[in-house]
């Protein structure tokens, strides 16, 4: 017979913690919880983009996040 493990006080049930597939894709910016993703970009274009980011004292990620927000109509 298997031993039962009793959860410690204050733990949440798995069903209340589990995320739907769409929740896993959408990150809450307030938590600063950014994930990594892979996209295909022309290498020459990406090199130029990195130079642009450096010249404007920002990061590629910051520029991509800003562009995506503008496209989606978010602030």
Image: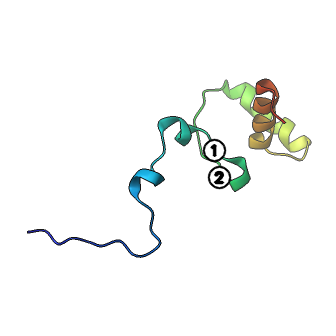
Tell me, yes or no, if residue 41 can be seen here.
Answer: yes
Q: Residue at x 48, y 39 (%)?
A: 20
64 or 23, nearer to the observer: 23
Q: Residue at x 60, y 30 (%)?
A: 39
Residue 52 sits in quarter: top right
Q: Furthest residue to the bottom? A: 9
20 or 70, nearer to the observer: 20
Crowding at dot 1, Cα within 10 Å, few <14 / some 14-19 / many 20+, comes out as few
Query: Vertically, is 3 above or below 29?
Result: below
Which of the two labelled residues, at mark 1 and mark 2, occupies the earlier sequence position? Answer: 1
Provide residue 15's location: percent of width, then percent of height. Answer: 41, 51
Q: Is residue 67 left or right of residue 39?
A: right
Query: Vertically, is 35 above or below 49?
Result: below
Name the residue carrying label 1: 27
Name the residue carrying label 2: 33
Q: Residue at x 58, y 39 (%)?
A: 37
Q: Residue at x 74, y 26 (%)?
A: 45
């Amino acid at each position: 017979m298997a031993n039962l493990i009793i959860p410690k006080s204050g733990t949440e049930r798995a069903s209340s913690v589990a995320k739907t597939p769409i929740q896993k894709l959408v990150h809450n910016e307030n938590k600063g919880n950014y994930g990594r993703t892979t996209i295909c970009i022309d290498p020459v274009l990406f090199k130029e983009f990195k130079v642009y980011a450096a010249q404007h004292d920002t990061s590629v990620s910051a520029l991509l996040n800003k562009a995506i927000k503008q496209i989606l109509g978010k602030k």
